[in-house]
Amino acid sequence: MTFDDVRRFLLALPGVEETTSYGTPSFKLGRKMLTRLREDGDTLVLPEVESDERAMLIEAEPAVFYVTDHYRGWPMVLARLSAAEPAQVEPLLMRRWRAVAPKRLLAAHDAKG
């Protein structure tokens, strides 16, 4: 998976805009960050992944998912794009989008089917 794949996936969702965070590309919906690329150019920061789920992801796919000490106390997981398949990352991105999207955007998106 590449960052361009992430870009295409997220920009197809209503209300998503590309911006920057900490000097790297990121995507937001309103003021809420959906994800950002870390400085290494290969790692995606995926917020709102609680510690139990994060541990499960890391155990199941250690080549893809990991966490650094910096993120250990936060509900986030990191994903190595070069080792990831879209089916591993897109559900986490979609869940985050759905969690922060206003009801009108959810309704418009869901109506499209």
Image (cartoon, grey):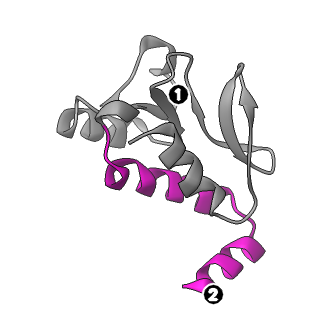
**Residue 27's x, y, as percent?**
67, 43
Q: Main secondary structure of the magenta part?
A: helix
Q: Residue at x 32, y 40 (%)?
A: 84
Assess disc 2: are there few (<14), some (14-19) or many (≥20) residues with their C-alpha within 10 Å of its C-alpha.
few
Question: Vertically, is 113 above or below 31?
Answer: below
Q: Is residue 102 magenta?
A: yes
Circle 1 — which element?
Answer: loop
75 or 110: nearer the viewer: 110
Corner quadrant of residue 37: top right
Picture quarter containing residue 104? Answer: bottom right
In this view, the residue farthest toward the left is 60
Q: Which residue is mark 1?
A: 74
Q: Residues within 10 Å of mark 1 (few under 14, many from 20)?
A: some
Residue furthest top as drawn: 69
Say which element carries label 2: helix
What amino acid is found at the position of numbered circle 1 in the picture? Trp
Circle 2 is placed at which residue position?
Answer: 111
The quadrant of the rendering that contains the C terminus is bottom right
Cα–Cα gap, marks 2 and 1: 34 Å
Q: Which kind of residue does numbered mark 2 sit on?
A: Ala
Q: Name the residue nearer the viewer: 37 or 51.
A: 37
The boundaries of the magenta stretch are 84-113
- Quarter of the image with the N terminus is top left
Q: Seen in the image, is 3 located left or right of residue 99?
A: left
- Circle 2/circle 1 CB separation < 8 Å: no
Q: How many marks?
A: 2
